[in-house]
Image (cartoon, rainbow, N blue to C red):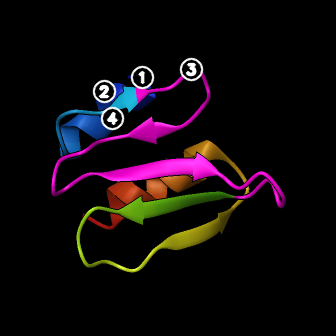
Amino acid sequence: MTTINALNTVSQGWTESRVGGLLCNPSKSGAIIDVALKSGEWFVIFNDNRKTLDGFESRDDAVEAFIASN
């Protein structure tokens, strides 16, 4: 299963800026999953009132955190 497919099982509408890059879903149940340029750590910014998650070593770790938060 691809990353996009895995995310879409939780919340439909995910897109990817480029292979291995930023992931975005504009729906209320979506988020932005991206990497901080300075630290190289991945983060999740939710589109609702959930607290931002950060400090992930990889995009896969951030995706797993998003999926687990739902």
User: Disc 3 or disc 2, which is closer to the eye?
Assistant: 3
Which image quarter holds the C terminus? bottom left
Q: Amino acid at mark 1?
A: Thr
Disc on res. 6: 4
**Location of residue 11 in the rendering, given as x and y in whole percent from the top left corner:** 19, 44
Magenta segment, prevailing SS (helix, strand or loop):
loop
Q: Which residue is mark 2?
A: 5
Q: CA distance from mark 4 to mark 2?
A: 4 Å
Are the two marked residues, 1 and 4, in contact with CB atoms closer than 8 angstroms? yes
Q: Which residue does the image show at 29% across and 42% down from the upper left? A: 25
Q: Comparing marks 1 and 3, which lies closer to the viewer? A: 3
Type of amino acid at the residue the image marks with label 2: Asn
Q: Is residue 56 left or right of residue 1?
A: right
Q: CA distance from mark 1 to mark 3?
A: 14 Å
Q: Are marks 2 and 1 in contact (CB under 8 Å)?
A: yes
Where residue 39 sits in the image (x, y, percent)? 83, 61
Q: Toward the viewer: 34 or 60?
A: 34
Going by the image, does 20 lie left or right of 63? right
> Does the stretch in magenta take in 55?
no
Instruction: Kindly report the distance in space between the C-alpha atoms of the residues bearing marks 3 and 4.
Output: 17 Å
Q: Are marks 3 and 4 in contact (CB under 8 Å)?
A: no
Question: For the residue labelled by badge 4, is the local secondary structure a helix, a strand or a loop?
Answer: helix
